[in-house]
Amino acid sequence: MKKIVLAYSGGLDTSVILGWLRKEYDAEVVAYCADVGQGEELEPVRAKAAAAGACDCVIDDLREEFVRDYVFPVLRANATYEAGYLLGTSIARPLIAKRQVEIAREHGADAVSHGATGKGNDQVRFELTFAALAPDLAIIAPWRTWEFEGREDLIRYAEQNDIAIPVSREKPYSCDRNLLHMSFEGGILEDPWQEPYDDMFVLTRSPQDAPSEPQYVEIEYEAGNAVALDGERLSPADLLTRLNEMGGRHGVGRIDIVENRFVGMKSRGVYETPGGTILYIAHQAVESLTLDREAMHLRDSLVPRYAEMVYNGFWFAPEREMLQALVDESQKPVSGVARLKLYRGNVTIVGRRADRSLYDPDIASFDEAGGYDQADATGFISLAGLRLRTRARAGS
């Protein structure tokens, strides 16, 4: 290896990895940091990478691309994995890895590296993206080859080598943040009976400490995508940022789950997804008026498989792209406005409207016929029950 591009955050793992790569491979290392909405000043990362011996440090602002091309497609599908996980980390990794490949090409690198552990999902997400976009590049996954066995070893190594790190033995859980969510795992959270410390949360207030008065918000959609908030048109990243602030203030979007990782083990994760939770519910409200029943049911029947593909790292696989085309076709009529109430951890739909609504109050009303002949239901029910009557007569 002559030059390696490392997905670098400046955190514990990648800080140690940068020095380890230089020593182990006697190669130049380009540190690459993707801004997907970590909410922190990233320029210090550049100085930190240089101090650790990186030959270059690339910091890219990918926030708009992340929300527009990754978050919104998943929200158009109403996709969640297992017990309500909105796939925040899962969809950031393909974008980060895609840009990492582009930087490797630009710098003439012959290898890429990441800090994902050998027990987690992220190693799969990074490397399946590399396989799809750059099968010629070598992949270095230090956690699967080096002598360190756990984060305690890395903390000790960092202390011995004067490497500044953002974790301690008192709070050793791992955090990942982007514009869609913040996740926590490891450390005290490895005991599924242990309640998370309240001071662990970053994006959201505790619902008990949220305002005592609800806040109403209106979100406008066009073809399945949120385009305006309370009448103000915003870019995808700006809209999600604004909703994160609103939802966080009202304690919206906290979940605590035990999920099934792709590599085969169960893992406990705690997530904060305030803006994404609001958008997930608002989208369903507009769909309820505008999406045809059979189109909705067909899409919904495929969503668990779609979510599994995204969670497992198959973003650039043909099956995900095929399902995305189906989802996007279904979203063409999904335009309208959802009105929501945010109150102490809850998001409640209180109104929805659409110019092309399929809801006809004249037909639905119990007080007038509206062109619907109730007598027609007799034949409809008779045909629907034919097989049941036949089965009963046969004694089955």
Image (cartoon, rainbow, N blue to C red):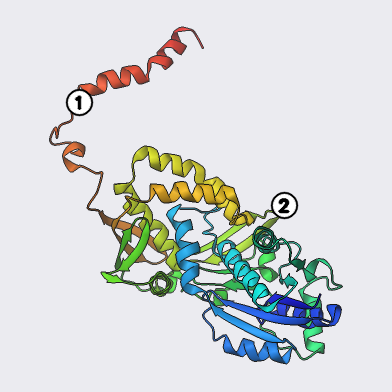
Can you see residue 82? Answer: no
Residue at the top extreme?
394
Q: How far is mark 1 from mark 2, CA to CA?
A: 53 Å
Q: Position of residue 386 (x, y in %)?
A: 38, 15
Is residue 252 found left or right of 36 in the rendered image?
left
Quadrant in the rendering for residue 233: bottom left
Q: Is residue 314 above or below residue 105?
A: above
Q: Amino acid at mark 2?
A: Gly
Is residue 116 found left or right of 317 in the rendered image?
right
Quadrant location of the N terminus? bottom right
* Residue 169 badge: none
Name the one closer to the observer, 95 or 386: 95
Other residues around mark 1 within 10 Å, as few (<14) / some (14–19) / many (≥20): few
Residue beneath the point at 78% across and 76% down: 152
Is residue 80 found left or right of 332 in the rendered image?
right
Mark 1 vs 2: CB contact within 8 A: no
Q: Secondary structure at mark 2?
A: loop
- Please tell me which of labels 1 and 2 falls first in the chain: 2
The residue singled out by tag 2 in the image is 264
Can you see residue 294? Answer: yes
Residue beneath the point at 31% across and 67% down: 228
Q: Amino acid at mark 1?
A: Gln
The residue singled out by tag 1 in the image is 374
Name the one closer to the observer, 187 or 335: 335
Q: Position of residue 230 (x, y in %)?
A: 27, 69
Quadrant in the rendering for residue 236: bottom left
Residue beneath the point at 27% across and 55% down: 352
Q: Secondary structure at mark 1?
A: loop
Quadrant in the rendering for residue 258: bottom right
Residue beneath the point at 78% across and 88% down: 159
